[in-house]
Image: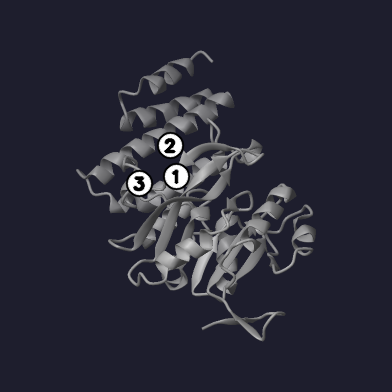
């Protein structure tokens, strides 16, 4: 059992370690995220905020808040690396990660822990959530079980293990090496795939977290080159698990088609027409009947 010093008692047992990675965010959202952890009905927890070498006043804000352990990385390494730093310092046998823009309902830890703790075979409990705007207004319900269509869903048995909506058994997290810091995107999906197995995931059909969509963190039609590179690395990493003739192989082909189509759109916007045409042709090799990709390929000759 792990312990930390508490001002209220001699020792407090840490059951859950919470990690928030932070980097140059809107500080009022980070403050709200921290307060949502401090308001949890589960008191046997510690909160570690990992500053991923921010250049704004993130550190100044966090260090004014009570009951928060602040850790600053010397170099920016991305969210996966920051989460791993926090997990390495964690004292509790259970781990939860909250993104700096997101929020928890007050009973998130209590309810997920009550399910995971007695379920010895399980390694993750994940719940449903809400997509909210910058004013915390609900945009849509986000269900954590989806019909498997993409390679990412097939390799997780349909489980959508959102980072801010999951509680992990730390021993299992450590056993698979934590997050892959080489991935700039989909590192949470990659972790779930490596953890997945029969009976190891438990879905709680209750919205206990809120994922904030606004400005720079909202999804865009054309991903950045950094995001596309991360997606390519992810697909290359998991391609060996997709044997020819299986649903996984078919889904992988579809995901490659989407990747190359998005890469083509990026090049087309940058007026790199030759590179755009090459990307669209690659996409059509995987998905030859996609009308939108054909139309973009034609447009690349005249744009």
Quarter occupied by residue 52: bottom right
Q: Is residue 213 above or below residue 177?
A: above
Residue 271 lies, in percent from the top left, at 58, 23
Label 2 element class:
helix
Which numbered circle lies on residue 232? 1
Which numbered circle lies on residue 250? none
Q: Earlier in the sequence, mark 1 or mark 3?
A: 3
Q: Earlier in the sequence, mark 2 or mark 3?
A: 3
Q: Is residue 255 left or right of residue 249?
A: right
Q: Earlier in the sequence, mark 1 or mark 2?
A: 1
Label 1 element class:
helix
Residue 173 lies, in percent from the top left, at 45, 67
Q: Residue at x 36, y 51 (%)?
A: 159
Residue 71 lies, in percent from the top left, at 69, 67
Q: Is residue 166 left or right of residue 103?
A: left
Residue lying farthest bottom? 10
Which numbered circle lies on residue 259? 2
Q: Residue at x 38, y 27 (%)?
A: 281
Q: Is residue 13 above or below residue 72?
A: below
Q: Residue at x 47, y 54 (%)?
A: 188
Give the CA separation, mark 2 to mark 3. Answer: 16 Å
Q: Nearer the viewer, mark 1 or mark 3?
A: 3
Badges 1 and 2: C-beta atoms under 8 Å apart? yes
Q: Do we see residue 176 in this rendering?
A: no
Label 3 element class:
helix
Residue 17 lies, in percent from the top left, at 56, 69
Image quarter of the C terminus? top right
Residue lying farthest left? 245
């Amino acid at each position: 059992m792990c312990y930390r010093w508490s001002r209220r008692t001699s020792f407090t047992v840490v059951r859950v370690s919470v990690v928030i990675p932070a980097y140059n965010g809107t500080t009022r959202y980070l403050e709200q995220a921290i307060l949502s952890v401090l308001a949890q009905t589960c008191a046997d927890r510690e909160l570690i905020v990992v500053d991923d070498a921010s250049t704004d006043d993130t550190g100044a804000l966090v260090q004014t808040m009570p009951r928060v352990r602040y850790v600053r990385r010397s170099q920016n390494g991305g969210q996966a690396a920051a989460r791993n730093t926090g997990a390495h310092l964690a004292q509790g046998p259970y781990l939860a990660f909250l993104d700096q823009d997101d929020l928890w309902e007050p009973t998130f830890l209590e309810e997920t822990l009550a399910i995971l703790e007695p379920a010895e075979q399980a390694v993750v409990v994940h719940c449903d959530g809400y997509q909210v705007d910058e004013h915390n207004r609900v945009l849509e319900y986000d269900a954590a079980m989806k019909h498997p269509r993409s390679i990412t869903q097939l390799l997780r048995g349909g489980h959508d293990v959102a980072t801010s909506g999951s509680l992990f058994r730390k021993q299992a997290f450590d056993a698979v090496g934590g997050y892959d810091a080489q991935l700039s995107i989909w590192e949470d999906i990659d972790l779930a795939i490596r953890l997945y197995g029969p009976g190891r995931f438990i879905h709680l059909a209750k919205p206990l977290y809120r994922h904030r969509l606004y400005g720079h963190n909202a999804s865009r039609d054309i991903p950045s080159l950094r995001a596309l590179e991360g997606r390519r690395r992810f697909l290359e990493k998991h391609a060996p698990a997709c044997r020819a003739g299986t649903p996984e192989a078919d889904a992988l082909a579809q995901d490659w088609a989407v990747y190359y189509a998005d890469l083509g759109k990026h090049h087309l916007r940058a007026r790199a027409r030759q590179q755009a045409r090459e990307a669209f042709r690659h996409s059509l090799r995987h998905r030859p009947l996609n009308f939108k990709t054909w139309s973009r390929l034609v447009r690349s000759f005249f744009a």
